[in-house]
Amino acid sequence: MKNIDFDAFKRFAEQYAPFEWEIDRDTHQEDFRGKHSVLINLIRYWYAVQYIQAGFQNERIRSVVDVGSYPGCFVKILRELVNGEIEYTGIGLGFSEEYTSTMKKLGVRLFATELDPDFIEPRVVREWPVSNIDCCLLLDVIEHLVNPINCLDKINSSLRMGGKLVITTDNIASFGYIHHMLKRGG
């Protein structure tokens, strides 16, 4: 894995070619208007990159599962950082035709399933078609789950021994609640 510093990552983010759906045009927050998700989430994505770099210093990442993979930008980030090909699977509730077509061109396999079966009126829950994964990404998703235990169990079952899980959240209050819930067991 390439080892990049923050300045290199920031240059990558500034030159990043976003997907059309990543650009925030309608936000009431002037600082975000017209920017894409990699710039908006620059620091959280940088921390995720740092963690991946530290966790895979002397290893090659061969497989990644991206839980809640929308908007799809992290596959571009990893392709920039990882030497060689990686098997990349995106898991989520459902995907538009445009998103599916674009991800297919990037070599991403998509799998639609309910991530939160305790949600009111959950969609169909299917067994994840991945195992022995090197790295799992749960980026800005956990705070949206009513009960993250099922999703975390699926992630645990999918990771290889010694595999890495990267979790980010933009909702610290919710994450604190989830941490407390995990500590007390549900």
Image (tube, helix red, strand yellow):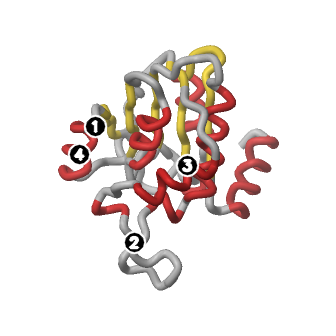
> Above or below — where is 60 with respect to 69?
above
How far separated are the C-alphas under marks 1 and 3? 20 Å
Q: Are marks 1 and 2 in contact (CB under 8 Å)?
A: no
Q: Earlier in the sequence, mark 1 or mark 2?
A: 2
Q: Name the residue under label 4.
A: 102
Q: Residues within 10 Å of mark 1 (few under 14, many from 20)?
A: some
Q: Residue at x 68, y 31 (%)?
A: 54
163 vs 132, left or right, is right
Image disc number at residue 106:
1
Q: Residue at x 39, y 43 (%)?
A: 76
Q: Point out the tag, 1 or 3, that comes first from the N-terminus.
A: 3
Label 4 element class = helix
Q: Nearer the viewer, residue 86 or 171?
A: 86
Residue 180, position in %: x, y?
Answer: 79, 50
User: In this picture, is 112 found above or below 179?
Assistant: above
Looking at the rendered structure, the secondary structure element under dot 2 is: loop
- The answer to whether mark 3 and mark 2 are in CB contact below 8 A is no
Estimate the x, y position of residue 89 in percent, counting from the top left.
38, 32
Q: Nearer the viewer, mark 3 or mark 4?
A: 3
Residue sitting nearer the eye, 119 or 161 = 161
Q: Name the residue under label 2.
A: 24
Q: Which amino acid does label 1 sit on?
A: Leu
Q: Is label 4 in contact with label 1 (beta carbons under 8 Å)?
A: yes
Q: How crowded is mark 2: few (under 14 residues within 10 Å), some or many (20 or more)?
A: some
Q: How far apart are marks 3 and 2 (CA)?
A: 21 Å
**Residue type of the residue flagged with mark 4:** Thr
Residue where numbered disc 3 is placed: 9
- Estimate the spatial distance between the alpha carbons at disc 3 and disc 4, rounded to whole Å: 23 Å
The percent position of residue 86, horizontal first and vertical second, equals: 40, 24
Residue ID at (60%, 33%): 3
